[in-house]
Amino acid sequence: MADALTMIEHVGQLEGTKVVYVGDGNNIVHSWLLLAAVIPFHFVCACPKGFEPDQETVEKARQAGVSKIEITNDPKEAVRDADVVYADVWASMGQKEEASHRRQVFQGFQVDEQLMKLAGKKAYFMHCLPAERGVEVTDGVIEAPNSIVFPQAENRMHAQNAIMLHVLGL
Ligand SMILES: NC(=O)NCCC[C@H](N)C(=O)O
């Protein structure tokens, strides 16, 4: 929800946009897939072979028939014409012992200046944080003017406040 809010604030809307996630097909991808089942946009997950998101969640999102959903192993092709390029750590919580192996497998999946150039001028960069700078994203990309990771982080507080008010019926 925080990510959707951030896109509305910066891109103008989520509907009809192209969001390209580059990296591990993890919990963040599953959240994007669930969002894609209710709001129409184009979601692409570019991940190494063997690190695709859960097939059942992909099918659930596709069967909703709301969004265009692509899973690919080619980040360079995936990012073309993206409105948002999105990254997350390659080794999530509970996987830190796999970090060194994953750094080898995920070569070519770093979001760097070259990949952002392929994405095009309109592309924003997002990351759920915490980031491992120099691993899944370069310093240059996360600090660039089109990086919206810090307003994205602030929006988690606003989104979570809204969820609590909703749950409490206030
Ligand atoms: N601020 C956040 O909630 N970040 C999510 C971190 C997701 C990452 N894939 C993890 O599970 O460690």
Image (cartoon, helix red, strand yellow):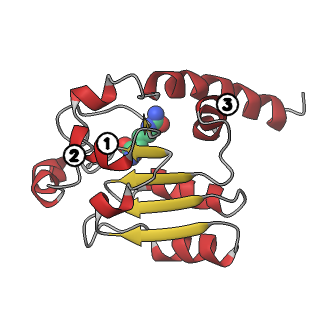
Kind of residue sitting beneath label 1: Met
Sequence-first tag of 3 and 2? 2
In depth, the one of 61 and 161 nearer the eye is 61
Please, which residue is most extreme toward the front here?
A: 121
Residue type highlighted by circle 3? Ala
Frontmost of labels 3 and 2 is 3
Left or right placement of residue 61 versus residue 87 in this view: right
Q: Residues within 10 Å of mark 1 (few under 14, many from 20)?
A: many
Q: CA distance from mark 2 to mark 1?
A: 27 Å
17 to the left or right of 140: right
Residue at the location (27% across, 47% down)? Answer: 115
- Quarter of the rendering containing residue 11: top right
Residue 132 vs 88, above or below: the answer is above
Q: Earlier in the sequence, mark 1 or mark 3?
A: 1
Disc 3 marks which residue?
159
The label nearer to you, 2 versus 1, is 1
Q: Residue at x 70, y 73 (%)?
A: 64
Q: Earlier in the sequence, mark 2 or mark 1?
A: 2
Residue at figure coordinates x 54%, y 68% from the top left: 69
- Residue 22: horizontal and vertical position, in percent? 34, 53
The residue beneath circle 1 is 116
State whether residue 70 appears in this view: yes
Secondary structure found at label 1 = helix
Question: Quarter for ligand 1?
Answer: top left
Counting from the top left corner in percent of width and height, residue 84 is at 47, 44
Q: Would you name the residue on which mark 2 appears?
A: 96
**Residue at 69% across, 59% down:** 40
Q: Is residue 141 above or below residue 21?
A: above
